Amino acid sequence: MDLARYFNEHRGTGVLATADATGRVNTAIYSRPHVFADKSLGLIMRDRLSRKNIHENPHAGYLFREEGEGYHGLRLWLKMLDESDDAERIAELSRRKKPYSGEESEGKYLVRFAIEKGFVLIGGEELEL
């Protein structure tokens, strides 16, 4: 599956699941990820609980449910590779140009993940990435 093409062609809702060092889980709504040439995924993150968690525990899960009827989408097992606070690169990648109220002063980070495995949204069918 070509993830760059998939995320360019499909709209929907993304959920990132992270856990802290003790295993306490957090979920948060995230936009479609950016897919880079090396097949890593990038998410633009604020300095909040999800980012704190991946610094304690680099493993995360990303679930994407496509818009429309039924349950179509995918689930990805991720592992954090690195992060950058390069404001120019983050601005270039940002799809949403206007911040939500209160976000103007918060820092942004481009966090890259390796994809360890991928699955269809419903069931155990593994995706070839």
Image: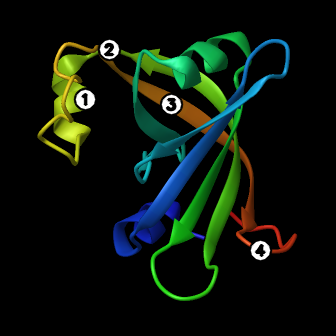
Number of residues whose C-alpha sits closer than 10 Å to that of mark 2, classed few (under 14), some (14–19) or many (20 or more): some
Image depth: mark 3 or mark 4 in front: 4
Q: Position of residue 93 (x, y in %)?
A: 25, 40
Proximity of marks 2 and 4: CB atoms separated by less than 8 Å:
no
| Residue to which mark 3 is pinned | 112
Instruction: Give the mark nearer the N terminus: 2 vs 3.
Output: 2
Residue 16 placement, left or right of 36: right
| Residue to which mark 2 is pinned | 85
| Residue type of the residue flagged with mark 4 | Ile
**Residue at 27% over, 15% down:** 106
- 93 or 30, which lies in front? 30
Task: Give the secondary structure at mark 1.
Answer: helix
Instruction: Give the mark nearer the N terminus: 3 vs 1.
Output: 1
Q: Position of residue 28 (x, y in %)?
A: 54, 39
| Residue type of the residue flagged with mark 3 | Arg
Q: CA distance from mark 4 to mark 1?
A: 32 Å
Q: Position of residue 44 (x, y in %)?
A: 37, 32
Proximity of marks 2 and 3: CB atoms separated by less than 8 Å:
no
Instruction: Give the mark nearer the N terminus: 2 vs 4.
Output: 2
Q: CA distance from mark 2 to mark 4?
A: 35 Å
| Residue to which mark 1 is pinned | 90
| Residue type of the residue flagged with mark 1 | Ile
